[in-house]
Image (spheres, rainbow, N blue to C red):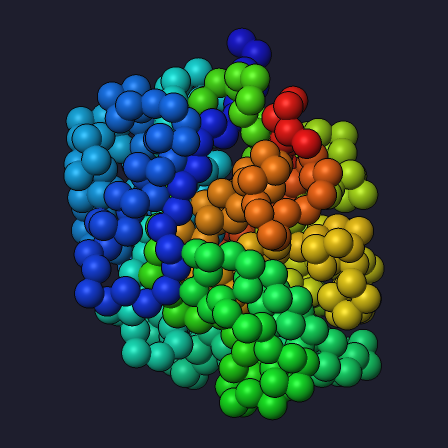
């Protein structure tokens, strides 16, 4: 039996920030309600739900769905670190594509402000956790290696933060909106883990996002493909930085499935929890060769108005990174971009979009998960 085409018919998000006084369910209700309304549906027309969260309470899926009239439908919970929400979107797409369900809602939600006073530390039974290597330190090791291997000036990493925070200044839902910082302010902000400074690290955020996936209809943003990988065994013999091989392999499958190339992509939302993350990801998916990704932001290639804008939402560095909802927030931004609804941060003429989220690895594994999706704008989009 042939697969059917799928599309995103509605998206929604909460605002992103630190909201310790709000219930996690409230954040999800805001996103779910907007997504269902955007799709022109009633709750009773949703057939199933996939909910992504990393640190949510037990029964998180039923907690957030019951409050918006979605109790009683088949419900599935996904956890894949930072890619949890994107895996929920992938599974919703696959379920509709195979004809298992009709309309499916994918939801991601996280409330980190009530869980952590500082950065997230890996599982203490893993070597990284025992060594006290919090996530900024792990990414800092990548950044230090990159600067040393390719002879790159630290300022080129900071340009990624300058760009994404300039984009985020036009996103009213972003955690860190307002006046964007200068290159000097990024470089001179508080050191976190050398060479990364505070403004090169994403904030600890709360928030939710949702998307309704259905059989493709005119006016939808089509999901051309959604590819999911889990990282293989990774050790000292692997010549590539952590996560790169998994992202590269996932991207290769996505392009092969659609016969598109990276040159066909007009706009991207990629995982930029730290500045080095965007650089390595863009190299892994082919925007630049190894060692040249650090030039993309400073050259203007990845800025709005450039050849291939990346993270017009502000990315994780500005919009925020509520782990379980990040991938679906990326999807919502790309849907708005492809519909021509992104306001001051609109990428002109965007027709093809790429979404990438990589969930950080467990000890000895290159990544918990990576999802890459390619989306195409509706027929009547500008």
Number of marks present in the image shown: 0
Task: Decide if residue 190 is in sight here.
Answer: yes
On the rendered structure, is 149 left or right of 343?
right
**Is 198 above or below relative to 320?**
below
Residue at image point 30% right, 73% down:
116
Quarter of the image where the C terminus is located: top right
Residue 259 location (% of width, % of height): 76, 30
Q: Nearer the viewer, residue 66 or 357?
A: 66
Residue at image point 44% right, 78% down:
134
Task: Decide if residue 243 is in sight here.
Answer: no
Kindly indicate the quadrant of the structure image that contains residue 179. bottom right
**Is 67 above or below relative to 98?**
below
Residue 56 location (% of width, % of height): 26, 55
Residue 187 location (% of width, % of height): 63, 86
**Is 232 above or below relative to 254?**
below
Residue at image point 37% right, 55% down:
15
Q: Nearer the viewer, residue 308 or 5?
A: 308
The extreme top residue here reads 1
Residue at image point 64% right, 43% down:
354
On the rendered structure, is 114 left or right of 360?
left
């Amino acid at each position: 039996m042939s697969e059917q085409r799928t599309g995103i018919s509605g998206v929604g998000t909460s605002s992103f920030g630190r909201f310790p006084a709000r219930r996690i369910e409230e954040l999800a209700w805001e996103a779910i309600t907007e997504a269902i309304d955007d799709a022109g549906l009633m709750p009773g027309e949703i057939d199933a739900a996939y909910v992504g969260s990393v640190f949510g309470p037990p029964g998180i899926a039923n907690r957030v769905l019951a409050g918006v009239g979605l109790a009683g439908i088949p419900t599935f919970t996904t956890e894949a670190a930072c890619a949890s929400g994107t895996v929920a979107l992938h599974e919703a797409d696959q379920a509709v594509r195979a004809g298992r369900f009709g309309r499916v809602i994918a939801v991601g939600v996280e409330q980190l402000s009530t869980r952590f006073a500082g950065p997230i530390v890996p599982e203490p039974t893993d070597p990284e956790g025992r060594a006290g290597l919090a996530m900024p330190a792990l990414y800092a090791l990548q950044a230090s290696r990159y600067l040393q291997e390719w002879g790159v000036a630290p300022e080129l990493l900071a340009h990624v933060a300058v760009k994404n925070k300039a984009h985020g200044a036009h996103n009213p839902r972003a955690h860190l909106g307002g006046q964007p910082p200068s290159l000097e302010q990024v470089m001179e902000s508080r050191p976190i883990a050398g060479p990364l400074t505070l403004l090169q690290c994403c904030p600890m955020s709360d928030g939710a996002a949702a998307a309704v996936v259905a059989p493709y209809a005119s006016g939808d943003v089509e999901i051309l493909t959604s590819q999911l990988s889990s990282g293989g065994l990774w050790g000292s013999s692997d010549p590539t930085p952590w996560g790169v091989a998994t992202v590269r392999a996932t991207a290769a499958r996505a392009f092969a499935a659609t016969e598109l190339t990276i040159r066909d992509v007009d706009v991207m939302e990629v995982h930029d929890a730290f500045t080095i993350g965007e650089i390595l990801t863009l190299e892994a998916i082919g925007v630049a060769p190894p060692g040249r990704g650090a030039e993309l932001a400073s050259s203007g290639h990845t800025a709005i108005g450039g050849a291939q804008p990346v993270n017009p939402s502000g990315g994780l560095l500005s919009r925020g990174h509520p782990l379980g909802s990040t991938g679906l927030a990326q999807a919502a931004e790309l849907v708005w971009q492809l519909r021509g609804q992104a306001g001051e941060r609109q990428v002109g003429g965007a027709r093809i979009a790429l979404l990438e989220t990589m969930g950080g690895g467990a000890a000895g594994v290159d990544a918990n998960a990576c999802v890459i999706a390619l989306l195409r704008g509706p027929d009547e989009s500008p």
